[in-house]
Image: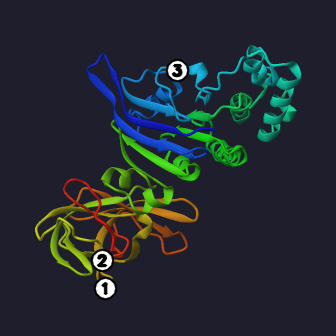
């Protein structure tokens, strides 16, 4: 196992355009870290730079305390699992997993011991004599992971390994990979664009955007305390609702803002840098909104129009419109309540302690 440290790491092509912009990141020995972000944000490029498959244009990379910028990929003591399984179709599972060890000149007994141990960990021992065409997608991905395990790398690198699997297999493989980390206690870096994978797998999550790190933290911290509008909007399903607003008053209990429909909403946040008249963005997650009948009395309530309703079994997602705002507000509602009809009106209660405010630069204000 080994730590990974990046200092002001830059990637540019033709010395003109940077794809990675001065990334600083420390990954502890034995830690499971997930790189997440939209397509084209640089997360896979950075992973390939760590692996040595892409050159580093600037900055330093240390693996296990050793400068690795110019170390050949084969000598970095890493193992990478790709989105494509990349198995040899003419070889059995055993032969696929043993191939790298045989090339390294290990004895037959050592190779068999390593392969059988990895197969036992991944629960694929009965499949060792099968060929890839006889396996399901999930089984093939287990073989690809097993091929990495037998090499006993210091760091595991995963580049969107579950993208080719169907939904149920992705859930199963998430559990398998998490269990694998607990058993091996190895350093793992996992790239995905799927926020569910990021939230369920990572001990820490690194959120990328445009080749830069937006925020690093635990799943709990990023979900409940996003640092800016991008992180708040990227993590969460449905994503956080954003409504343009204007600061009206500032007090000891937080900030009162005016929404486009004329409603006044109290938000329990510190008002650092704000003053009456400041333009802000109000953010609130769908699951924190409380749905009620139109005209319901109470503070911190807004009236909305009901649009599309998606029934998901235990909950429903209700898309609504707020007068003067272009955003659609999604609301989760128990399905055993009275059904809502498109075109009807409803009331939404916004708990002051659950709402967030973002300043004009998109930075989140601290909650009280």
Q: Quadrant of residue 96?
A: top right
Establish if 221 lies above or below 14: below
Instruction: Point out the residue furthest to the bottom here.
Output: 297
Q: On residue 71, which mark appears?
A: 3
Is 80 drawn above or below residue 349 in the view shown?
above
| Residue 354 visible, this angle | yes
C-alpha span from label 3 to label 1: 67 Å
CB under 8 Å between discs 3 and 1: no
Number of labels in the image equals: 3
* Mark found first going from the N terminus, 3 or 1: 3
Which residue lies under the disc numbered 1?
297
Instruction: Evaluate if marks 2 and 1 touch, with contact meaning CB atoms under 8 Å apart.
Output: yes
Give SS at disc 3. Answer: loop
User: Is 173 left, or right, of 343 in this rendering?
Assistant: right
Task: Provide the residue designation for mark 2.
Answer: 301
SS at mark 1? loop
């Amino acid at each position: 196992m080994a730590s990974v440290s990046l200092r002001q790491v830059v990637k540019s092509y033709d010395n003109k355009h940077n794809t990675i912009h001065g990334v600083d990141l420390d990954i502890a020995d034995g830690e499971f870290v997930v790189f997440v972000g939209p397509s084209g944000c640089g997360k896979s490029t950075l992973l390939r730079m760590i692996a040595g498959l892409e050159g580093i244009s600037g900055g330093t990379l240390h693996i296990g305390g050793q400068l690795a910028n110019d170390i050949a990929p084969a000598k970095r003591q890493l193992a990478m699992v790709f989105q494509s399984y990349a198995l040899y179709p003419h070889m059995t599972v055993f032969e696929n997993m043993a191939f790298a060890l045989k090339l390294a000149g290990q004895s037959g007994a050592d190779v068999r011991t390593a392969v059988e141990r990895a197969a036992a960990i991944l629960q694929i021992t009965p499949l060792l004599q099968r060929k890839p065409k006889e396996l399901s997608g999930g089984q093939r991905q287990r073989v690809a992971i097993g091929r990495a395990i037998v090499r006993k790398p210091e760091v595991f690198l995963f580049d969107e390994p579950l993208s080719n699997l169907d939904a149920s297999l992705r859930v199963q493989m998430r559990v398998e990979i998490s269990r694998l980390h607990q058993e091996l206690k190895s350093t793992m870096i996992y790239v995905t664009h799927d926020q569910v994978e990021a939230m369920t797998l990572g001990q820490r999550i690194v959120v990328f955007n445009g080749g830069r790190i937006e925020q690093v933290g635990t799943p709990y911290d990023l979900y409940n305390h996003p640092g800016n509008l991008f992180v708040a909007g990227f993590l969460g399903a449905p994503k956080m609702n954003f409504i343009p607003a204007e600061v009206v008053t500032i007090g000891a209990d937080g900030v009162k803002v005016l929404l486009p429909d004329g409603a006044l909403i109290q938000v329990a946040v510190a008002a650092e840098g704000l003053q009456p008249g400041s333009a802000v963005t109000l953010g609130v997650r769908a699951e924190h909104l409380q749905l009620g009948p139109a005209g319901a009395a109470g503070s911190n309530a807004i009236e909305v129009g009901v649009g599309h309703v998606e029934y998901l079994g235990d909950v429903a997602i209700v898309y609504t419109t707020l007068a003067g705002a272009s955003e659609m507000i999604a609301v989760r509602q128990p399905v055993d309540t009275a059904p809502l009809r498109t075109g009807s009106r409803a009331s939404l209660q916004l708990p002051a302690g659950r709402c967030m405010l973002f300043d004009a630069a998109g930075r989140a204000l601290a909650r009280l």
